[in-house]
Image: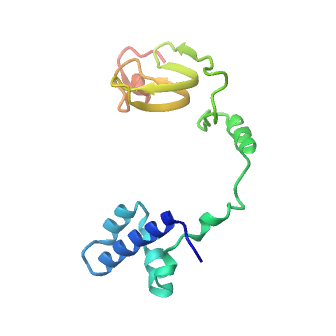
Amino acid sequence: MAYPPGAVECAMKAHEVIMRALDGQLTWIQAAEILGRSPRSIRRLRWLLQHRGYDGLFDRRRRTPSPKRAPVAEVRAVVARCPSGALRALPSEPENGSAAVTVRVSEDGPVLLRGRIRLERADGALLAELEAASLCRCGATANPPFCDGSHERLAGHRG
C-alpha cells in the first residue's frame, strides 16, 4: 500500500522517537511531548511497532472520512442553540467583507463584543478570531485582555 510522503515522514519520526525511548535515551513522557501525543497514544504506538512492525505506525484513518463526521450546517445549528454562548463557530468565509460588531459596556463589568472579531496585539500579531468576547476593563484579569470575573472581587463592585 502506498502512503503519502507526509504519512511516511510521520511514521519515520514516530519510529525514531519510540526506538530512542525503548533504548532508554528518552522517557516515555518525553517521547509523548516530542510527538505531540498523549502517553496513552505512545503506549499504543509502541504496541503497534512491537506487534506489527514498522507498518503498524502508519495512520490509516486519514484515507477515508470518519462516519461520525457531521455536516457543517448541523454543527452550526447545534452551536446556535447553545444557551450559554460557550460554543462558537467562525464563519468559513466572511460575508460582504466585514460584519457589524456590537459593543456593549456593562456596568461594573467587561466590554462585551459580538460579531466577527479579530483581536491583535500591539505589534499586529493575531491574538484571536472570535464571534464573541468579554474584554476586561478593570485590569485585574489573569487572562488579559479577556475578562475572567476578577472585577467581582474588587472593592466598590456593585454586582
Q: Residue furthest bottom?
A: 51
* Above-or-below relation of 159 to 24: above
Q: How is the image coloured?
A: rainbow
Q: How many marks?
A: 0
Picture quadrant where residue 46 is located: bottom left
* Above-or-below relation of 103 to 145: above
Percent position (x, y) of residue 5?
Answer: 49, 65
Picture quadrant where residue 34 is located: bottom left
Residue at horizontal 38 percent and vertical 32 percent from the top: 143
Percent position (x, y) of residue 78?
Answer: 71, 41
Q: Nearer the viewer, residue 157 or 66?
A: 66
Picture quadrant where residue 18 is located: bottom left
Residue at horizontal 27 percent and vertical 72 percent from the top: 26
Residue at horizontal 47 percent and vertical 70 percent from the top: 8
Quarter the N terminus occupies: bottom right
Residue at horizontal 68 percent and vertical 60 percent from the top: 65
Percent position (x, y) of residue 50?
Answer: 44, 85
Drawn side of residue 64 relative to residue 119, left or right: right
* Above-or-below relation of 49 to 127: below
Percent position (x, y) of residue 51?
Answer: 49, 87
